[in-house]
Image: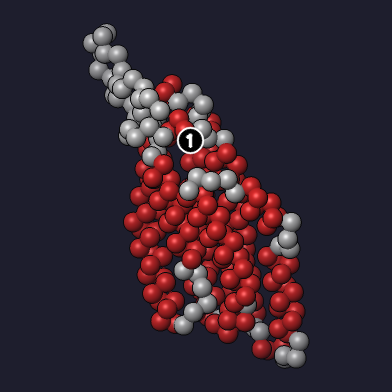
């Protein structure tokens, strides 16, 4: 792909602020989405020591990858020279940036509710480990596929035809309650689990929006290695 013109016409002697030529290198998008996959990958039902290690890794990835790129995107959206990339209109770019920012907040919420449930309701979290592993692998797989800028329509379609997380959770809780007394699963434990499932569901909704936004972008126009 040939490079377009760099800079602006200053023949009228007016001082102008150069505008960015491209909003984001593909490597930046890869890093953001790959970081999301790494964070999700650490949400596993493991020993207390392994969970502590996982929290530290998640925090490091969030602080060194997710937050910096999120801030960069907000600046890029304002400074992009849209005339250089006509297929990617301001509306499409704003949708993409908003979707990525939403992923950032939802991802943080999942981490918070997961840690709370794992800390305060460890036994139930262990009992629900198969369900946790099921959604974790699905989400991680989609983020990893997006990090390669590959289409995820088949993955999302397959997912949408299956039972919802809340439905599966209620089924598993019903099974767990069989043969147990009412006090075995207290209200706080249930609140922690349903808060986690709610945050996961919100993340899934944000991912659906991101998928739609990514399909609207002409990534080839942004493939020029200029920033």
In the displayed image of the protein, which residue is found farthest to the front?
A: 1
Q: Taking 110 as reference, is 51 above or below it? A: below
Judge left or right: residue 98 versus residue 187: left
Q: Closest to the observer: 108 or 84? A: 84
Q: Is residue 70 visible?
A: no
Q: How many marks?
A: 1
x and y percentages locating residue 7 in the rendered image: 30, 21
Q: Taking 175 as reference, is 27 above or below it? A: above
Q: Closest to the observer: 92 or 188? A: 92
x and y percentages locating residue 124 in the rendered image: 61, 81
Label 1 environment density (alpha carbons within 10 Å; few <14, some 14–19, many ≥20): some
Judge left or right: residue 192 versus residue 42: right
Identify the residue at image location x=36%, y=43%. Answer: 72
Identify the residue at image location x=60%, y=42%. Answer: 212
Q: Taking 194 as reference, is 84 above or below it? A: above
- Residue 59 figure quarter: bottom left
Identify the residue at image location x=47%, y=33%. Answer: 220
Q: Taking 137 as reference, is 21 above or below it? A: above
Identify the residue at image location x=58%, y=51%. Answer: 207
SS type, badge 1: helix
Q: Closest to the observer: 187 or 205? A: 205
Judge left or right: residue 58 versus residue 190: left
Q: Is residue 74 visible?
A: yes
Please name the residue that numbered disc 1 is placed on. Answer: 219
x and y percentages locating residue 42 in the rendered image: 46, 69
Q: Check the picture and name the quadrant holding the C terminus.
A: top left
- Residue 141 figure quarter: bottom right
x and y percentages locating residue 91 in the rendered image: 53, 31
Q: Check the picture and name the quadrant holding the N terminus.
A: top left
In the displayed image of the protein, which residue is found farthest to the top?
A: 12
The chosen color scheme is secondary structure
């Amino acid at each position: 792909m040939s490079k377009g013109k760099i800079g602006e016409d200053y023949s009228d002697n007016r001082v102008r602020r150069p505008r960015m030529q491209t909003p984001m290198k593909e490597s930046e998008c890869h890093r953001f989405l790959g970081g999301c996959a790494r964070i999700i990958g650490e949400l596993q039902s493991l020993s207390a020591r392994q969970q502590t290690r996982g929290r530290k890794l998640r925090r490091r990835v969030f602080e060194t990858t997710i937050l910096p790129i999120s801030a960069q995107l907000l600046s890029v959206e304002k400074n992009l020279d849209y005339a250089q990339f006509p297929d990617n209109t301001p509306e499409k770019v704003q949708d993409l940036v908003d979707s990525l920012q939403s992923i950032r907040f939802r991802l943080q919420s999942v981490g918070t509710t997961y840690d709370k449930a794992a800390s305060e309701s460890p036994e139930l979290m262990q009992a629900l480990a198969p369900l946790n592993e099921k959604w974790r692998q699905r989400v991680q797989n989609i983020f990893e596929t997006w990090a390669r800028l590959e289409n995820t329509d088949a993955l999302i379609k397959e997912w949408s035809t299956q039972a919802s997380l809340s439905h599966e959770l209620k089924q598993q809780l019903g099974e767990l309650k069989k043969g147990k007394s009412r006090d075995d699963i207290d209200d706080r434990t249930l609140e922690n689990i349903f808060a986690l499932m709610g945050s996961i569901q919100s993340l899934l909704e944000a991912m659906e929006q991101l998928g739609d936004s990514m399909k609207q972008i002409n990534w080839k126009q942004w493939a020029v290695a200029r920033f």
